[in-house]
Image (cartoon, rainbow, N blue to C red):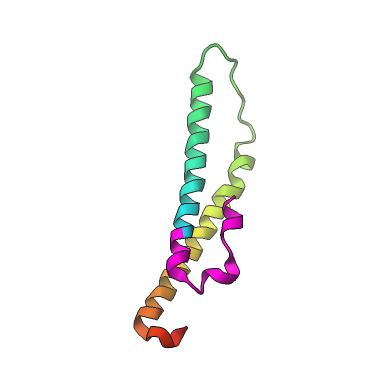
């Protein structure tokens, strides 16, 4: 689970490592969504199976979409911290 892998209490202390983990998390969330879409299309295209109704689409993706947006914001914050480290040097830490 992506949420368990992101430790907010430690993430800003090592922004370089955090960015790598954040990008992997975003990739996992996006891959999961793509795989869901592919599976849904395959099921709908299959003519031997009755159409599978996807009425809960919003509920299924609300948390992953929100999590991805949070990760994007945290990534941006980590990049800013990296820039501060580059400008101010080790005294910032």
Residue sitting at 60 percent across and 15 percent down? 50
Q: Is residue 2 magenta?
A: yes
Instruction: Tell how many labels.
Output: 0
* Depth check, front residue: 87 or 62: 87
Tell me where the magenta segment starts and ends, as one range. Answer: 1-20
- Position in image of residue 34 (x %, y %): 47, 38
Kindly indicate the quadrant of the structure image that contains residue 19: bottom left
Residue sitting at 51 percent across and 72 percent down? 12
Residue sitting at 53 percent across and 34 percent down? 36
Q: Is residue 60 above or below residue 24?
A: above
- Magenta: main secondary structure equals helix
- Position in image of residue 42 (x %, y %): 49, 23
Residue positioned most to the left: 87
- Position in image of residue 25 (x %, y %): 50, 53
Residue positioned most to the bottom: 91
Q: Is residue 6 above or below residue 34?
A: below
Residue sitting at 61 percent across and 49 percent down? 63
Q: Is residue 58 above or below residue 87?
A: above
Q: Is residue 15 magenta?
A: yes
């Amino acid at each position: 689970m992506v949420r368990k892998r992101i430790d907010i209490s430690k993430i800003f202390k090592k922004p370089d490592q955090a960015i790598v983990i954040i990008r992997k998390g975003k990739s996992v969330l996006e891959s999961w969504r793509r795989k869901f879409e592919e599976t849904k299309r395959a099921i709908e295209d299959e003519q031997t199976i009755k159409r599978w109704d996807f009425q809960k689409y919003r509920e299924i993706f609300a948390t992953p979409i929100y999590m991805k947006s949070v990760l994007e914001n945290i990534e941006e914050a980590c990049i800013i911290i990296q820039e501060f480290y580059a400008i101010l040097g080790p005294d910032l830490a």
